[in-house]
Image (tube, coloured by chain):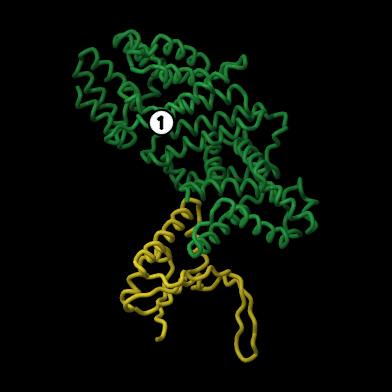
Amino acid sequence: MNERLFRRESGRIVAALTRIFGPHNLALAEDVVQDAFCRALEVWKVRGIPDNPSAWLMATAKNRALDIMRRDRTARTFAPEIGRLLESDATLAPVIDEAFAPQAIRDEQLRMMFSCCHPLLPEEAQLALILNILCGFGASEIAGAFLTGRAAIEKRIARGKKVLARGKRLFDLGDAEFAARLATVARALYLLFNEGYHGASAESAVRVELCEEAMRLTALLREHPPAATPATSALAALMCLHVARLPARIDAAGDLSALVDQDRSRWDGRLVAEGLALLESSAAGQEVTPYHVEAAIAAVHAGARTVEDTDWPAIVSLYDRLMDVAPSPVVALNRAIAIGQRDGPDGGLAALHGIADRDRLSHYPFYPAALGELELRRGNREAARRHFRAAMDVARNGAERRFLEKRLQGC
Amino acid sequence: MREFVLLFRATEAAHREAMGTPARAQQSMQAWLAWMRELEAKGHVKNRGQPLERAGSVVRGKAKVVTDGPYVEAKDLVLGFCVIEARDLAQAVEAASGCPILEGEGSVEIRPVME
């Protein structure tokens, strides 16, 4: 049995049911999912796992939905789009069958994704909603990944669901707002991926799943031609090129390994190739998004067999570009580190000290760690130790702390 | 070897709680499958039982009064059963004590089959 089975199917079944029930009946759809899971437990433990467990769950949910529609047809309002079709038994079953067809499920998942990125919702609520509805994560798992309290996440999800319900229907993929909303969706998936890749949570299992989910949902965008823009390809490229490095990011002892120390033979060649192909296809338009630039930086790294082999001047100029289109203290930090590689530690330190809003990095352990790294390269062991100690004070989890401790011991 | 019937009991709420989120559903399913495999590996399983619908009827008394399920309010609903073989009651109890239903507010009733 696939270890993601219930999570994945939950998102697909809820999407299919929302097409019939309408977004104001999300709780009912979730009940149906839970019913299907309960039946699965009773039946599978006696008769064994069926050959196609996801088809089994789908069929069970479909039957349950049919029962509910027959029973509640007059007492409840369902999706307005299909209202009349639900009135007779003859049209009821085909409508439900249609909602559970693979293409319909894909479309509904997309519409759900666009609805979750409603402009009235703050970004963190959009992410919590996507993770809950489309990815089947519970509030406590989401809270774990974001290092937030469970109650706060539950509130975000509840508020988000209220906004969804108010709409009575999910976002229409033919809507005039499509392009603007697509940008918000891409941004949410980018943040979701980053949370998995760089996030604060120590729970590595959940974090890898966040990356996987971000990639799965981005792939869903790419399957829908109007959403398969160059920016979407660039986003997919940057995800592939980063995930390709994951096998080397944790070393044999289970500790974090910095990009410059990674055993590059452990990078996933298939994902690198896929990422490079995606990056090439993203060059189709005129627009250069931050995703393009970030993917290009990852591509330069992917093409270098060693740290010395890396085209640092190219990386620095890409970071210059990124500072133009999407400036942030973290981008400035990475740019300074690249300058340190290109020009030596003095240049890197000057760039670090020149970061305009560097006080915003005061709780980000990799800023003092970068200072320590460069001081160490200058032979300034005492200063390096001081910076690594400062970094350890703001480390967010055990993996970061062990990583910094090793740096400190190397001084 | 003697035969024992295991009756799995829980409230509907506890049962739904065990399947409350996809992650919990996955865990519960895996725990049950692992426990069943373990019972089988130890040669206990005589009959895996049958999955039971919640909905049903109860006939009561001379007047044969029929009440219909589902019995969602029942304090300890029989959720299912299986038949195992064990040396004696103590060994049957030991086998039953690994049952995942005990992780929630459920119970397993162990009844020897008369010889």
Q: Residues within 10 Å of mark 1 (few under 14, many from 20)?
A: few
Between A138 and A45, the one nearer to me in the picture: A45
Q: Position of residue A84 (x, y in %)?
A: 80, 51
Q: Amino acid at mark 1?
A: His
Q: Position of residue A31 (x, y in %)?
A: 59, 56
- Residue name at image x 22 percent, y 18 percent: A383
- Residue name at image x 22 percent, y 26 percent: A408
Q: Chain of mark 1?
A: A
- Taking A219 as reference, is A100 left or right? right
Between B36 and A193, the one nearer to me in the picture: B36
Q: Position of residue A390 (x, y in %)?
A: 27, 26
Between A272 and A404, the one nearer to me in the picture: A272
Residue under pointer 1: A198
Give the quarter of the figure containing the C terminus of chain A. Answer: top left
Q: Position of residue A306 (x, y in %)?
A: 33, 17
Task: State the hue of chain A.
Answer: green
> SS at mark 1?
helix
Give the vertical position of A51 relative to B99 (above or below). above
The mark total stands at 1
Between A138 and A233, the one nearer to me in the picture: A233
Give the vertical position of A315 relative to A142 (above or below). above
Task: State the hue of chain B.
Answer: yellow
Give the vertical position of B61 relative to A262 (above or below). below
